[in-house]
Image (spheres, rainbow, N blue to C red):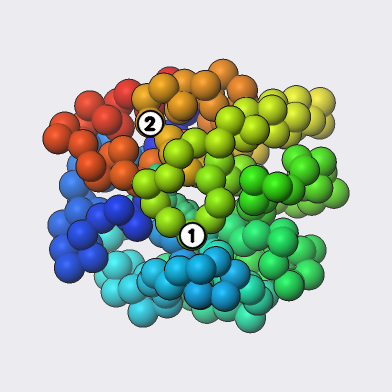
Amino acid sequence: MTKVSPSILSADFANLERDCKKVIDNGADMLHIDVMDGVFVPNISIGLPVVKSLRKKSDAFFDVHLMIIKPHLYVEEFCKQGADLVSFHIESESDVKETIDLIKKCGKKAGIVIKPATAPQEVFPYLDMVDLVLVMSVEPGFGGQSFMDNALDKLKVISDEAKRRNLKDLYIEVDGGINETTGKMCAESGANLLVAGSYVFGSQDIKAAIDSLKI
Ligand code: DX5
Ligand code: ZN
């Protein structure tokens, strides 16, 4: 069954503890925490102090998605402050292998992310080193955008390659525009971890929304 990682970008930041508890109590497997620096993406969200504060209030697994220009400078601090998994973009300025190694040295899980214009084969050199590959199905930066269906082919290419290499534990995550319909299409194309922000937090029935993404 697919796992669900609600993106707290769509939560109420003035009531973050309450909203995180709400999704976890309603069946979310983890929390997706979007970090943006206003340089790698044209938006600024939250950073280290929020991860640190949230860690004191929640035992949930923190799936931290870094949309920052130089992730290698910050990954260790995110691990120290409470991230369980740190993913970063291969389009950033950091050396990919070096950054994966820094995360692993902290004893945390490492993930790599590709934007919509990046070919799926770009992750192949790192597939055996990472715990997660995240395929963006919108241009990173904002919640509430429409799903781009070129993500489906990319998920298929990556999941076929993971199968070929027998990487049974690899998380294949998709992020952006996920709802009941697009989530199902992604699961059929090989995703096993679905991020959803506006769909989950905007729903009247959060439990039903999360359940609908367990495919
Ligand atoms: C976008 C973020 C996403 C975003 C998804 O850059 O990485 O995690 O919160 O939001 P929805 O699910 O609303 O597209
Ligand atoms: Zn994200």
Q: Tell me residue 128's x, y (percent).
A: 78, 45
Residue 132 shown left or right of residue 101 in the figure: left
**Residue 206 occupies quadrant:** top left
Residue 158 shown left or right of residue 76 in the figure: right
Q: Which residue is mark 1?
A: 141
The image shows residue 152, relative to residue 72, as above or below, that is: above
Q: Residue visible at 56% across and 36% down?
A: 148
Compare residues 117 and 205 and report the one nearer the observer: 117
Q: Which residue is mark 2?
A: 179
Question: Within 8 Å of ligand 1, the CB of disc 2?
Answer: yes
Q: How many numbered circles does the render carry?
A: 2
**Residue 55 occupies quadrant:** bottom left
Residue 200 visible in the displayed image: yes
Q: Tell me residue 131's x, y (percent).
A: 64, 47
The image shows residue 77, relative to residue 63, as above or below, that is: below
Q: Calculate the distance from the C-alpha at mark 1 to the C-alpha at mark 2.
A: 18 Å
Residue 75 visible in the displayed image: no
